[in-house]
């Protein structure tokens, strides 16, 4: 990369100056611009990004500059589903070396608060999470990240699959929170990317029967191809809940032990509460609405537990084991691939925002 006669330090400086990233500058305004990295700490690594996926939250920020209580107030580098190759390790890093392929867990917690000490670090109030304002994300040539949040990929797991560990982690964490297993039949509301990874995770946890519900025929067909035992097409009309609950019960053929609402709307949550059996659980994974009006009282009289899910904790080792063993195959979820040019970044986000046949849109850097 350097010209003849340049010192190694000059070449290194030149490389650092050339680090580029996709910056969110405003609504529907993404630009590839230089991104200066922080200095490498003793416990950090510098990673050359190779695969970065687009999440629904990234699209949300691009379209509205906000997601729930998180608001983009100044330019921010986008992206958080990622994997790459180690370029440099800090002086105290012992478990990784230059050239290692790694998947990155994107959230840095404080490790000092009570929640962190209890092991629930995903709830840390000081969490610094890629591409959650004001923290910069990972759609860049290189990033600096704590080494303990970089997980070496097994030889038979690709960099793209490594990047898919992030969305898969949401499904794995949801399954752990709801305590699914070989004796629990599962209903999944929503066949978007998170609904589909929850389907894959539930199956890997040994769930015998899984029904998936959505409004979209194509997404339902994908769920069927990925191993759903039954699919139910529903409407967006709240008046149809009772009728659709009956259809779900018919498809399940037995009681619904656990429902994952991977959409998070009044309609989906009302259906979830109505379809879940007495003493069952509803796990709210999706965040479609900030506030909902749902029939909680009737659910309470049937002792249906409502469980919240936020991101994940300690999931990467299990995700990588599932991928390595073949218990989970995330490759069919990657439907579109783009390079890292200004034109392709814009096209990729348009493709993801359009939905349709796009499930996971992936950048190859």
Image (cartoon, rainbow, N blue to C red):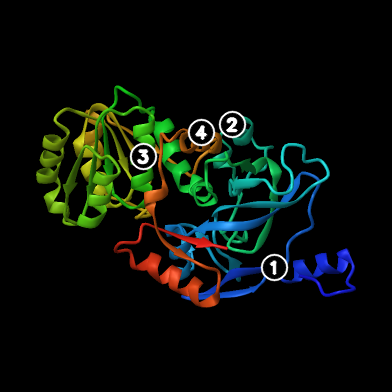
- In three-dimensional space, the C-alpha distance between marks 1 and 2, rounded to whole angstroms, equals 35 Å
Q: Is residue 110 left or right of residue 9?
A: left
Tell whether label 1 touches label 4 (CB within 8 Å): no
Q: What residue did someone put label 4 on? A: 321
- In three-dimensional space, the C-alpha distance between marks 1 and 3, rounded to whole angstroms, equals 36 Å
Q: Residues within 10 Å of mark 2 (few under 14, many from 20)?
A: few
Q: Nearer the viewer, mark 4 or mark 2?
A: 4
Q: Nearer the viewer, mark 4 or mark 1?
A: 4
Where does the image place residue 151, in percent across and percent down from the top left?
62, 41
Q: Is residue 216 visible?
A: no
> Which label's residue is closer to the chain start, 1 or 3?
1
Q: Secondary structure at mark 4?
A: helix
Where does the image place residue 265, in percent across and percent down from the top left?
29, 52
Q: Which mark is residue 119?
A: 2
Where does the image place residue 327, in percent across and percent down from the top left?
41, 34
Residue 9 figure quarter: bottom right
Rendered residue at 64%/31% (across/down): 117
Tell whether label 4 touches label 3 (CB within 8 Å): no
Q: Which mark is residue 19?
A: 1
Q: Which mark is residue 200?
A: 3
Q: Residues within 10 Å of mark 3 (few under 14, many from 20)?
A: many
In this orientation, which residue lies closer to the viewer: 163 or 167?
163
> Which label's residue is closer to the chain start, 1 or 2?
1
- In three-dimensional space, the C-alpha distance between marks 3 and 4, rounded to whole angstroms, equals 14 Å
> Which label's residue is closer to the chain start, 2 or 3?
2
């Amino acid at each position: 990369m350097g010209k003849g006669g340049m010192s190694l330090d000059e070449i290194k400086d030149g490389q650092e100056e050339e680090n580029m990233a996709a910056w969110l500058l405003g609504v529907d305004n993404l630009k590839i611009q230089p991104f200066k990295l922080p200095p490498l700490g003793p416990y950090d690594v510098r990673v050359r990004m190779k695969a970065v996926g687009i999440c629904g939250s990234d699209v949300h920020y691009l379209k509205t500059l906000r997601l729930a209580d998180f608001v983009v107030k100044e330019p921010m580098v986008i992206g958080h589903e990622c994997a790459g190759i180690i370029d440099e390790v800090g002086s105290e890093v012992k478990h990784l070396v230059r050239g290692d392929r790694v998947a990155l867990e994107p959230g840095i917690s404080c490790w000092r608060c009570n929640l962190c000490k209890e092991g629930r670090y995903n709830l840390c109030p000081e969490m610094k999470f890629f591409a959650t304002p004001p923290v910069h994300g990972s759609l860049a040539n290189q990033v600096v990240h704590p080494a303990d949040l970089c997980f070496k990929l097994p030889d038979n797991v690709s960099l793209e699959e490594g990047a898919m560990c992030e969305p898969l982690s949401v499904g794995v964490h949801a399954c752990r929170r709801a305590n699914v297993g070989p004796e629990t039949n599962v209903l999944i509301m929503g066949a978007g990317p998170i609904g589909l990874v929850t389907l894959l995770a539930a199956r890997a946890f040994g769930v015998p029967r899984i029904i998936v519900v959505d409004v979209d025929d194509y997404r339902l067909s994908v769920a069927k191809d990925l191993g759903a035992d039954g699919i139910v097409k529903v409407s967006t009309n709240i008046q149809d809940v009772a009728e659709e609950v009956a259809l779900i019960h018919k498809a399940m053929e037995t009681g619904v032990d656990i429902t994952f609402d991977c959409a998070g709307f009044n309609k989906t949550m009302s259906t979830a509460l109505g379809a879940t059996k007495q003493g069952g659980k509803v796990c709210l994974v999706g965040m479609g609405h900030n506030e909902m009006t749902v029939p909680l009282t009737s659910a309470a009289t049937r002792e249906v537990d409502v469980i919240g899910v936020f991101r994940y904790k300690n999931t990467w080792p299990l995700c990588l084991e599932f991928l390595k063993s073949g218990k989970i195959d995330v490759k069919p979820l990657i439907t579109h691939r783009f390079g890292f040019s200004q034109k392709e970044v814009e096209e990729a986000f348009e493709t993801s925002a359009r939905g349709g046949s796009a499930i996971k849109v992936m950048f190859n850097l």
